Amino acid sequence: MDLPLLDAGPFDPHRLDIVRLAWSRRLQMDDRALDTDAERVEHVGATDDVTVLRLAETTVIVGPSWAVDASRAISGPASADRTWISALLGDRSAHYEIGTHTLAYGSDIGHTIDVHDPLISHDAQHARNLAAHCSDADVAEAFGEPVSRNWFTLLGDDRPADSAHSLASAGYSEEQLILADMRVLTDPDHRRRGHAQVVGMATNDAIDDGLIPQWRSRPENAVARRLAARLGYVEIGACHTAALRP
């Protein structure tokens, strides 16, 4: 299935340089390794895991030497689907757990929630209460990494705060002291009501802290990708990770 990157318009070159720096550090490469307009960047990693990163016009391959060598036989840039990394892994695919996310980056949102005087909680427990009402896939995307986040949860105003229903939640964690890795979760019974725009609050909070907001979505999650685009996030890449199974 073809899952192209969204055509979201240009992305600020200075901010792109900062995003490149963050990814260079995350992939344990030299700080200037991705400071390039080259179509390909290769790096032999220290483990058997493989990462294929598409960032703007550059495809980055990080992994063992066999993976780097195999990538040279694949033409064109990596996209949001798994065709590229599946071709790279070949017969080894069965031994790897593959994860894929599109990458979008934001600037000042300026959006408001369509609720008069919204009741916002920063208590992680309200985010966990919301998770109990959502699908496993949505929860995995929002809570998939054991890191602390700065949560903004929109609560219903029909009860006191300590017993209020959690409608939507957004939060972020810092990466490399540069990026704010955003997450958003909305109660299935309260979707398409504008509540997910609580992510605008989290986005602006991250920007106030000097971070660049990063929104990762499963490629097939068209709702999340469209929401990010409506909030001003620009989709400029995708990351495919292949972790060797135990």
Image (tube, rainbow, N blue to C red):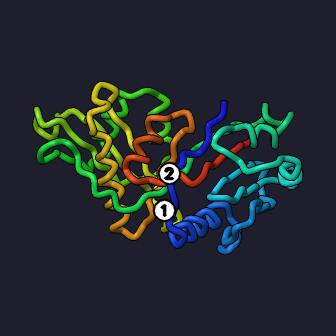
Q: Quadrant of the N terminus?
A: top right
Looking at the image, residue 120 sits to the left or right of residue 18; the answer is: left
Circle count: 2
The residue pinned by badge 2 equals 8
| Residue 196 visible in rendering | yes
Cα–Cα gap, marks 2 and 1: 20 Å
Mark 2 or 1: in front is: 2
Q: Residue 20: image x %, image y %?
A: 60, 66
Q: What residue is pinned by disc 1?
A: 179
Please tell me in which quadrant of the rendered image residue 34 appears. Answer: bottom right
Q: Nearer the viewer, residue 224 or 9?
A: 9
Local SS, label 1: strand
Q: Amino acid at mark 1?
A: Leu
User: How far across and how far down the image is residue 85, in percent?
Assistant: 75, 42
Q: Quadrant of the C terminus?
A: top right
Amino acid type indicated by mark 2: Ala
- Badge 1 local density, few (<14 within 10 Å), some, or many (20+)? many
Q: Residue at x 32, y 34 (%)?
A: 130
Nearer the observer, 215 or 241: 215
Asked if one can make out residue 246 in the rendered structure from this viewpoint, the answer is no
